[in-house]
Structures are given as C-alpha cells and as structure tokens.
Image (tube, rainbow, N blue to C red):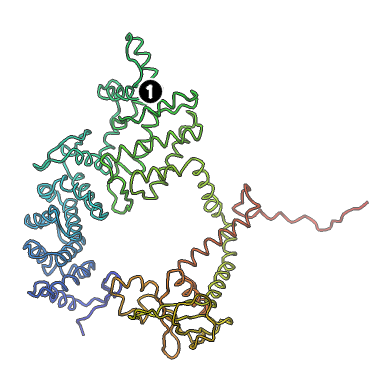
C-alpha cells in the first residue's frame, strides 16, 4: 500500500507531488536504473523512453540523481555503445535532468565532452542526436567557465557554420544558440570580427571566404558587438572613414571628371557629398559600421539629382538611420533571448544576406520618399512608414530575399495608409466602453444566428465514409436532422449522394432527447485503438461520437474540418451546450465586426465619448407653463 503515486496520464507526465510516496519513488527509480543497465536491448530502450518522459518531473529527477542516475547515463554515453533511438533518449533524459540545476555541470568528464562533441562533428548523424548534442554543449558553455574552454577546444565555429547550411530549422536554431554561447563566454580578444570576408584559421582548420563572411554576418546579427562599436564616435579626420566616403562618392558619380585644380576638385567634392546627404555633424554621430559600399548608391543619387531641391532624399542620413532601424527591428546588439521565436530563413539563403537586405530596404526607403513627396522636414515620418513596411514584410516570414522584395512591393505607402485605417477601425475605436457595451449586446443575436445556420445544415444532412472498410468499393452512410430538430435519421448508402437524401431512405434514427453527450478525438470509441498511429492523426482530428441510451454510440469521421465544425457545433447546440469550434469563433468575430461597422456607419469621424454625458441638475421648480400670449 505504500508503493504508489499519482501521475498525470496526458501531456507532460508529472507527478502530483502532494501525494508522492517516498518508498514508491525509491523502488521505482531503482527498478528503472536496473532496466537501463539490463542486457536486453528492447528492455533498455523502453526504460530509456520512460526515463526521457519522467526526467522533466522535479521530484523524480531529485530521486534519480540521488541514486547516481546522472553518472549512469554519462557512462552509457562515454561507452559509445548506444546509437540511434536509444542514444537520442539517453541524451534527452540527461539534458532534462541537468536542467533542474541539482547537479553542477563541472562534474562532467573530458571523455563525455569529447563524445558529445564527436556527434556534432560527425558528417552524417541522426537529427535528434545532433539537436540534443548541440543543446548539451550550449548548456555546458553557459553554465561553466572551465567547460567553455574544454568545449572550445573540441568545437570550432567553422564546424558549427556547416550546420547552418541544412534546411532543418531546429538544427539551425540550436547551432546559432551554441555560437552565441561561445561568443558570449569568449575572452575579448577572441571576439574581434574582421570586416572583410578573408580566409581565416580557427582550430587549425581553414574556413572558406564565404563561410568567414557568413560568420561575420552572424556575429553582427546575434552578438553584442555592434553596440560596442556604437559607443565610439566617428572622427571625420579618420583616414579609413574618409576613404570609405571617398569611394562612395566615386561610385555614385563615376561619370564625373576629377581633373582640375585643387580648389575646383574641393568645391566639386563638397557639392557631391552634400548631394549624398553627408555632413560633419552627421558623421560625428554615426558608428563606423554604418557606411556601406557597393554599386547601389549611383541610381539613387542620380535620381535625387533630378528632383527639386526640397524633395531630395538625403542618402547619407537615410543610410545611417536605416541601419540603426534595422538593428532595432532585428534586435542586433541585444543578448540572445530564449523566449523569442522570431526566425528569418532568408538570412541563410545568401552569402551576403545582411548587405543585400540593407540594399533592398534602402531602395524601399527611396521609393517611399518619392511616393510621399517628402521634404527634409518629413524625414521622421518617412522613416516611420518604412519601419512599418519592413516590420509587416518580415512578419510574413519571407523564405528568400526575392520574396521579401515581392512583399515590400505590395506594401506601398497607399497600402500602409489603408491598413492603418482598417486597423484603427477594428482596434482603437472598438475599445471604448460604449463600443464594448454595444458589442456585448450584439453577441447573443449573432450566436443565435450561427446556431440556426448550424442546425439548418444538420437538417440538410451530410455523407460520411465508413471507417475501416478494406474493400475496393467504398461504403458510405448519411445522417441528417429532422426538420423539427427532434430526431437524427441515418442509414447506409451504396454510393456518395449528389444531393439531399430523403428521410424514407434512412432506416435508422436516434431521438435527440436520448442523446447523453458528444465526444471528439481520442475520446471516441472508434479512435482509441488508432490514436497511436501517425497516419491516423488526420482521422483523429475529424472524429466525433454521439452517446445515447442505452450506452450506444453513433461514430462519425467528418470528410473535412468544415463539416467537423458544423456537426460538432450543431450537436452541441441541440444539447444546449456552448459551440466552441474554431469556425464558430471565426464566424462570430466576422459577423460582429460587420454588424458593428454597419451600426457605426453614421458616426464616422465623430469621436465617441468614453462615458455618457452627465445628467443635468433638476430645475428649481416644476411650476412652469408656456405662455402662448
């Protein structure tokens, strides 16, 4: 009687700690450890599967670690005898147990580190093993200074960059996380980044030029380096910066003749730099990394030269502010955030993705400036619009830079204005108390309308396939609700009907008053044996059953998600229960918004007060009449 405990059956199989019996844990943990070390491969695999699930529970983890479980798992990894699924479950359990923070990471041996690093360095390794190995190495680096040096000796950034070339998003994410960890813990002299994509040597292994450049881009995008550069002000007399600006002028005005006297060239350069949008005060506030070289400025500057002076787009100022804006949008210079789920695959599709991204955005800025017919006074307004254009385009998760260009083309200035107006109508104006009160009054009417639509669809009926039919010729059955909503009629059909099936052809029936409940998914009787199979996942999501007297069931598998929502909503409505499908929520939101806009049509451009007007004071006397004379 002492050897039992309560554990949740679904989801994370955690124990209900208030009811944990110590003797049960001692016995079950010892038995699990024995099974893990057993000679039978099947028994060991099942034990490791169970351990991987239970390791997330803090109570179990504490007991397992007390019995030297961590050491047992580490020895299994060090032995090199585990492969494939067995090794994946071993690494999963190890990582879960260490994440509880009960045991110090410093206790890990060098042979264990070498074994884990070996999985990362192997050219062909199972994805699940690679993912867990990267996660373990990241935790080692972040949790121990001494382990950082050991891991850095076994893993080079060049080797990790190779994992960024795969299409698996999780592997890319874990690889970047480990690169982040290595750079965050690295000494200052090892964090220095070369601005040129040259051949570099790390760990006695050369990295190709394009790989080195991608490493540079990753560092700029993910590490706290740009912020350090931003702290140093630019000196206009700095020769390197002067060379960059001079090269930018030469590219933009390639057709100009630089011959002539010193004074003539000086005057010409001053004019060119002014047209490029550079001033001394601007250069004093810019970071060194803000100046970009390339062939892009020429068409933009030449286009500006043909505009009126007041409508010129200052390229230098725009480039610097745009770079700062892109850093803010992509959170460049901020520490890695584990809770952030933003992922932009387009940065892995090009060798010089950051520069190409900048070029796309500076062209967008120039286009938006022209569409807004902006002047120097409108600079901040233009930058706000451009920020919104870029943010909206990135939210669509373009897979490549070409897709980004396409999405930005569709987000013109007029489209941004339209989207702002639509969102203002749907969000800002609809949050005032009078509007919320009106919405609450309308909702019951809309819900009743949706309910009637669902019941009308049940009266029309639907055709369902028979589950488990192995014959070549498919069998069907039809079900529909009577017009008075009191009886469900159903029956078998030889073929799928083209129209409505009359009640006379449906031989069986169920009275709605006899229906006890409606269940869905894995709770359905006809799904309990099939829920474990991956190929039945879609069927599981479309299954529902009706329980009726005496303990009988009518089992359904809807042909699609729409019919599933219609029938589950309709049956819930018949039983007086809430309709909770995704379709109902979508319909309710759409219909309420339409009704609200119709009722508020006459109030356009009229500010709706937050509270009703005050009731005026009562008159001093009610003894008054109108004098017609």
Q: Nearer the viewer, residue 429 or 231?
A: 429
User: Closer to the camera, 33 or 127?
Assistant: 127
The percent coordinates of residue 491 (x first, y second) are 47, 85
> As drawn, which residue projects farthest toward the front?
472
Residue plotted at (61% across, 51% down) = 609
In this picture, residue 439 sits left or right of residue 153? right
| 418 is higher (above) or lower (below) than 435 | above
Against 276, residue 355 (above or below) is: below
Disc 1 is placed on an element classified as: loop
Residue 372 location, x and y as percent?
50, 35
Asked if 179 appears above or below 362 in the picture, the reply is below
List x then y, in percent, for residue 449.
58, 69
Rendering coords of residue 247 (x, y %): 29, 23
Which of the 4 quarters of the picture holds residue 298? Answer: top left
The quadrant in which the N terminus is found is bottom left
Q: Total marks drawn?
A: 1
**In which quadrant of the rendered view does residue 253 lie?**
top left
Q: Which residue is most to the right? A: 629
In-front residue for pair 111/483: 483
* Residue beneath the point at 10% across and 62% down: 77
Q: Residues within 10 Å of mark 1 (few under 14, many from 20)?
A: some
171 sits to left or right of 326: left
Return the residue nearer the eye: 228 or 82: 82
**Residue that badge 1 annotates:** 279
């Amino acid at each position: 009687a002492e050897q039992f405990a309560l554990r949740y059956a679904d989801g994370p199989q955690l124990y209900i700690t208030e009811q944990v019996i110590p003797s049960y844990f001692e016995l079950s943990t010892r038995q699990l450890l024995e099974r893990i070390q057993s000679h039978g491969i099947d028994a060991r695999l099942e034990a490791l599967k169970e351990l991987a699930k239970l390791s997330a529970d803090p109570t179990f983890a504490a007991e397992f670690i007390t019995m030297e479980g961590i050491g047992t798992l580490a020895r299994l990894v060090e032995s090199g005898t585990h492969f494939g699924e067995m090794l994946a479950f071993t690494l999963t359990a190890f990582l879960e147990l260490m994440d509880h923070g009960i045991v110090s990471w410093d206790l890990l041996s060098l042979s264990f580190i070498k074994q884990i690093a070996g999985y990362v360095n192997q050219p062909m390794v199972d994805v699940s093993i690679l993912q867990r190995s990267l996660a373990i190495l990241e935790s080692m680096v972040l949790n121990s200074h001494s382990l950082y040096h050991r891991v850095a000796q076994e893993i080079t950034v060049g080797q990790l960059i190779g994992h960024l070339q795969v299409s698996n998003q999780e592997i890319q994410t874990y690889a970047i996380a480990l690169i982040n960890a290595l750079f965050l813990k690295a000494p200052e002299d090892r964090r220095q980044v070369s601005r040129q994509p040259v051949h570099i040597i790390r760990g006695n292994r050369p990295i190709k030029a394009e790989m080195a450049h991608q490493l540079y881009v990753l560092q700029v995008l993910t590490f706290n380096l740009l912020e350090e550069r931003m702290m140093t002000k630019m000196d206009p007399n700095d020769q390197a910066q002067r060379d960059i600006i001079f090269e930018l002028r030469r590219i933009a005005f390639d057709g100009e003749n630089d011959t002539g006297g010193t004074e003539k060239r000086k005057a010409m350069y001053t004019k060119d730099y002014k047209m490029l949008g550079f001033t001394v005060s601007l250069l004093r506030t810019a970071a060194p990394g803000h100046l970009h070289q390339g062939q892009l400025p020429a068409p933009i500057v030449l286009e500006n030269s043909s505009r009126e002076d007041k409508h010129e787009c200052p390229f230098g100022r725009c480039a610097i502010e745009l770079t700062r804006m892109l850093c803010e949008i992509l959170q460049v210079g901020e520490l890695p955030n584990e809770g952030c789920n933003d992922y932009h695959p387009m940065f892995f599709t090009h060798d010089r993705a950051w520069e190409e991204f900048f070029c796309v955005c500076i062209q967008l800025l120039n286009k938006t400036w022209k569409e807004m017919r902006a002047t120097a006074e409108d600079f901040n307004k233009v930058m706000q619009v451009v920020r919104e254009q870029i943010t909206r385009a990135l939210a669509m998760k373009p897979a490549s830079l070409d897709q980004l260009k396409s999405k930005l083309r569709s987000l013109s200035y007029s489209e941004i204005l339209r989207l702002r107006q639509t969102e203002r109508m749907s969000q800002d104006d609809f949050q005032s108390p009078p509007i919320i009160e009106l919405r609450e009054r309308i909702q019951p009417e809309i819900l009743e309308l949706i309910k009637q639509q669902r019941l009308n669809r049940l009266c029309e009926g639907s055709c369902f396939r028979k589950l488990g039919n192995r014959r070549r010729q498919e069998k069907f059955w039809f079900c529909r609700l009577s017009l008075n909503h009191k009886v469900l009629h159903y029956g078998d059909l030889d073929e799928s009907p083209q129209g409505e099936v009359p009640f006379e052809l449906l031989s069986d029936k169920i009275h709605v008053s006899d229906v006890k409940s409606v269940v869905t998914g894995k709770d359905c009787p006809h799904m309990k044996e099939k829920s474990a199979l991956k190929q039945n996942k879609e069927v599981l999501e479309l299954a529902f059953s009706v329980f009726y007297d005496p303990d009988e069931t009518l089992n359904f598998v809807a042909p699609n998600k729409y019919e599933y929502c219609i029938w589950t909503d309709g049956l819930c409505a018949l039983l007086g229960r809430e309709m909770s499908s995704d379709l109902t929520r979508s319909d309710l939101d759409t219909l309420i918004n339409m009704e609200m806009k119709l009722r508020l049509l006459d109030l356009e451009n009229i500010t709706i007060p937050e509270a009703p007007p005050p009731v005026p004071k009562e008159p001093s006397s009610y003894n008054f009449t109108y004098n017609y004379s």
